[in-house]
Image (tube, grey):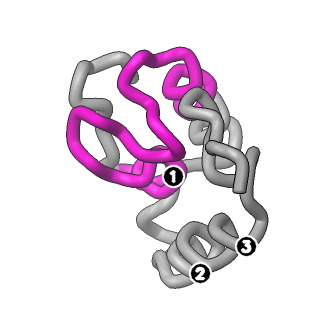
């Protein structure tokens, strides 16, 4: 199995892992706790450029960035967004 890209989001390198960990997790979140798609997209663009992104997780806090980025109360541990 090839080594995953450390600068990628989970959805960028493994459909199976993404669907299991992220898609199901996102479905379980209440709509009232989520930001609009435009905001989460901007947040993820910042995360993709961050040196702390590793295989879809934040090395600073350990979260899955694709889940944290959609939450209204989600915050970057480095205040980048």
Residues tagged 1 and 2 counted as in contact (Cβ below 8 A): no
Residues drawn in magenta: 43-72
Residue located at (51% from left, 76% from top) = 25
38 over 66 or under it: above or below:
above
Residue 40 placement (x, y as % from top left)? 58, 41
Magenta-drawn stretch contains 53: yes
Q: Is residue 79 left or right of residue 53?
A: left
Lower position in the chain sequence, tag 3 or tag 1: 3
Residues tagged 3 and 2 counted as in contact (Cβ below 8 A): no
Viewer-side label of 3, 2: 3
Residue located at (50% from left, 59% from top) = 34
Which residue is under mark 3? 16
Residue located at (42% from left, 45% from top) = 57
Which residue is under mark 2? 24
Which residue is under mark 1? 70
Q: Residues within 10 Å of mark 1 (few under 14, many from 20)?
A: many
Q: For the image shown, how many numbered marks are present on the structure?
A: 3
């Amino acid at each position: 199995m090839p080594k995953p890209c450390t600068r990628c989001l989970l959805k960028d390198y493994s459909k199976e892992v993404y669907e299991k960990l992220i898609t199901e997790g996102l479905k379980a979140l209440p709509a009232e706790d989520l930001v609009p798609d435009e905001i989460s997209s901007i947040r993820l663009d910042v995360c993709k450029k961050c040196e702390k992104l590793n295989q879809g997780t934040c090395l600073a806090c350990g979260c899955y960035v694709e889940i944290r980025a959609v939450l209204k109360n989600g915050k970057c541990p480095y205040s980048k967004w």
